[in-house]
């Protein structure tokens, strides 16, 4: 059966000379590649080497006034030639795949994806036009082969359109959200080694050179109280190892949220070695607190947290989209796992940048997905949804009650973030009753500590003092480097009786995973090894982002009449997706956007801006 289409130039013919008005780095000839990715690795769509829809050869200089149907010389130069069957071939299997035939100039938003040449049934207008040109037209009645290929071609076009959509998403998210992720990576690199920096800078507060047996905790606490007589005693962190200092924590109304004042005491001499402010569940000192706030909100308060939430919310999207793009490109060209995870060092110029950008991204993809997920749990809006979800599924962190049995007091519980609760907030500084209560509690600290050790609450602990006669001491393991558990116990200071116990082994699995995830994110789980892993991941992410911008910059036309930027992937890919599949994608996007509003709102903003640009270009084209 002969084809009904006009003759198509042989795809194996020698291509015309390339224009010198292309990109800064000319791509090298490569094997057949994914049709939606050019041979330089950019997320684009392929076109043939013949004239485009405007009848202009691909080497013709780009005229922006031509509207959406025009195409930059850069695009024609970078796009590869799909395999097109000869005009005499009617075998569907020998034709190029629908994805390879899916080529359209950038900006052709309203254009339907072209049907593969060998499969397409000519429309009536095509037959009339061809007959006027003297081309014989064959009837399409009984063309079973072409008709049966339509469902398969439709599915292939949907897959190809989804791939192209992924490329466009990766491009725009990388260009516009990249700065937020870059800032998060820079501050995250500093944050990853903050515990080590803290131990170096604050060595005199954290460590002492004195030797000998430790004095009773009561003596150490009394020394701290004498140093801060006007503040309410809150908790005690006994020294864990010889040479460490004991922290005695006080509630200070002049400090910010989750901050306490700490007096550091030499256990061997019971003398104060210094006073500082500590923050959060890990008792971070001012340097680490400053780095933490820089990474969290750039020291801009609540508005600044939107930057970190946007970065965390988009990081996994950009990473997974890049994975799809690279798998389609490297998988079709190299057919091997090695080329997915190792750069092709034989490439030069822009192609070399593409290979390193993708390969390094593959190396750090899993850590980045982890950091994105754990980072979102700390965010304002997505974090609230995570907390609600954990509560609904009973994945919350269990806590031990501080209420004494039969006391009739309202049961209170230990904070899931030790060091962030303020148990002494109800005490009036300097009041006689509070002073007497504090003195009695100080005398009971050693007994409570011994009871906790006897019940296998090991490791570095924090002893939270009761605020009334009806509450118990809470002894809980601290979140420090190398600590994998957080057992907690409630002890009656008068009798030494254990009134409540929560073992880490009894935590729900998801609560354990959340706790480990936080420790890994903070670089506190495996000590220095954990911190180095985070540091290397952040440095690798920085190189990926920088190379991404280099690729974008090098795609710009060199002979543009005005300042030009890199060309984005083509428009109009949504029209190639099956309506049912498109509906599913919209529902998923809406659900994700609701759960992570920083992602949903910015994605909607990208869509609105993209539509406006398309409308403006279309109006220019028709003017």
Image: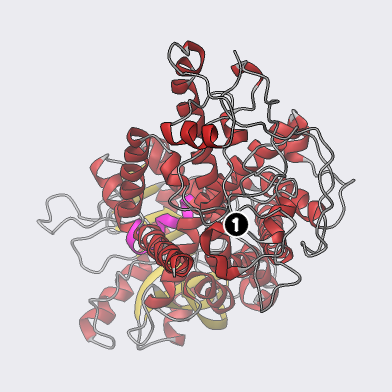
295 or 442: nearer the eye?
A: 295
Would you identify the image quadrant in which residue 336 lies? top right
Q: Is residue 415 visible?
A: no
Residue 236 x, y percent position in the rendering: 44, 67
Q: Secondary structure at mark 1?
A: loop
Q: Is residue 516 visible?
A: yes
Q: Is residue 77 magenta?
A: no
Residue 179 x, y percent position in the rendering: 57, 69
22 or 363: nearer the eye?
A: 22
Identify the residue shown where x is 84% and y is 57%.
349
Would you identify the image quadrant in which residue 448 lies? bottom left
Side of 546 relative to 111 (left or right): right
Side of 296 relative to 184 (left or right): left
Identify the residue shown where x is 59% and y is 12%.
1
Mark 1 neighbour density, 10 Å: few (under 14) some (14–19) many (20 or more): many
> Over which residues does the magenta segment extend?
373-382
416 or 92: nearer the eye?
A: 92
Residue assigned mark 1: 523
- Position of the C terminus, as image quadrant, is bottom left
Above or below, 23 relative to 210: above
Side of 32 relative to 167 (left or right): right
Residue 385 x, y percent position in the rendering: 30, 53
Q: Main secondary structure of the magenta part?
A: helix
Identify the residue shown where x is 73% and y is 31%.
337
């Amino acid at each position: 059966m002969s084809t009904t289409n006009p003759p198509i130039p042989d795809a194996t013919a020698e291509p015309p000379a390339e224009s010198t008005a292309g990109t800064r780095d000319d791509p090298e000839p490569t094997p057949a590649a994914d049709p939606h990715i050019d041979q330089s690795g950019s997320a684009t769509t392929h076109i043939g080497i013949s004239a485009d829809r405007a009848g202009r050869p691909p080497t013709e200089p780009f005229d922006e006034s031509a509207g959406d149907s025009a195409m930059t010389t850069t695009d024609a130069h970078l796009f590869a030639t799909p395999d097109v069957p000869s005009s005499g071939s009617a075998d569907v299997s020998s034709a190029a795949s629908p994805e390879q035939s899916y080529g359209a100039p950038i900006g052709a938003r309203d254009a339907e994806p072209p049907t593969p040449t060998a499969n397409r049934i000519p429309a009536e207008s095509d037959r009339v036009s061809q007959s006027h040109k003297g081309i014989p037209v064959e009837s399409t009645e009984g063309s079973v082969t072409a008709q049966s290929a339509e469902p398969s071609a439709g599915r292939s076009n949907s897959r190809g359109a989804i791939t192209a959509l992924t490329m466009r998403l990766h491009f725009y998210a990388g260009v516009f959200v990249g700065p937020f992720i870059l800032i998060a990576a820079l501050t995250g690199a500093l944050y990853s080694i903050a515990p080590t920096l803290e131990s170096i800078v604050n060595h005199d507060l954290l460590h002492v050179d004195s030797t000998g047996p430790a004095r009773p905790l009561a003596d150490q606490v009394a020394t701290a109280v004498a140093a801060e007589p006007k503040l309410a005693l809150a908790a005690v962190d006994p020294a864990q190892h010889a040479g460490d200092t004991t922290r005695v924590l006080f509630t200070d109304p002049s400090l910010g949220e989750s901050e306490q004042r700490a007096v550091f005491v030499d256990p061997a001499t019971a003398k104060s070695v210094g006073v500082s402010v500590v923050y959060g569940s890990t008792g971070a000192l001012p340097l680490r607190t400053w780095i933490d706030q820089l990474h969290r909100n750039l020291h801009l308060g609540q508005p600044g947290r939107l930057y970190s939430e946007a970065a965390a919310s988009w990081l996994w999207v950009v990473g997974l989209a890049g994975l799809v793009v690279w798998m389609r490109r490297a998988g079709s060209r190299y057919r091997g796992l090695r080329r997915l995870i190792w750069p092709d060092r034989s490439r030069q110029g822009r192609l070399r940048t593409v290979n390193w950008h993708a390969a390094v991204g593959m190396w750090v993809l899993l850590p980045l997905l982890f950091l994105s997920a754990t980072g979102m749990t700390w965010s304002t809006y997505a974090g609230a949804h995570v907390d609600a979800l954990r509560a609904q599924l009973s994945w919350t962190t269990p806590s031990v009650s501080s209420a004494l049995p039969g006391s009739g007091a309202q049961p209170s519980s230990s904070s899931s973030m030790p060091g962030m609760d303020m148990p002494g907030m109800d005490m009036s500084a300097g009041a006689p009753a509070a002073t007497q209560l504090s003195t009695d509690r100080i005398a009971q600290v050693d007994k409570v500590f011994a009871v906790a050790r006897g019940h296998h609450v090991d490791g570095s602990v924090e002893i939270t003092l009761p605020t009334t006669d009806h509450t118990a001491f809470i002894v809980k393991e601290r979140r420090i480097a190398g600590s994998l558990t957080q057992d907690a116990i409630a002890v009656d200071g008068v009798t030494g009786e254990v009134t409540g116990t929560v073992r880490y082994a009894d935590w729900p699995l998801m609560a354990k995973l959340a706790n480990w995830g936080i420790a890994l994110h903070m670089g506190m789980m495996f000590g220095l090894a954990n911190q180095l892993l985070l540091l290397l991941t952040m440095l690798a992410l920085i190189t990926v982002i920088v190379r991404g911008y280099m690729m974008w910059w090098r795609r710009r036309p060199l002979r543009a009449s005005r300042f030009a930027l890199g060309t984005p992937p083509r428009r109009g890919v949504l029209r190639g997706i099956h309506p049912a599949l498109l509906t599913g994608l919209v529902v998923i996007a809406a659900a994700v956007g609701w759960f992570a509003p920083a992602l949903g709102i910015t994605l909607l903003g990208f869509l609105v801006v993209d539509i406006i640009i398309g409308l403006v270009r279309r109006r220019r084209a028709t003017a």
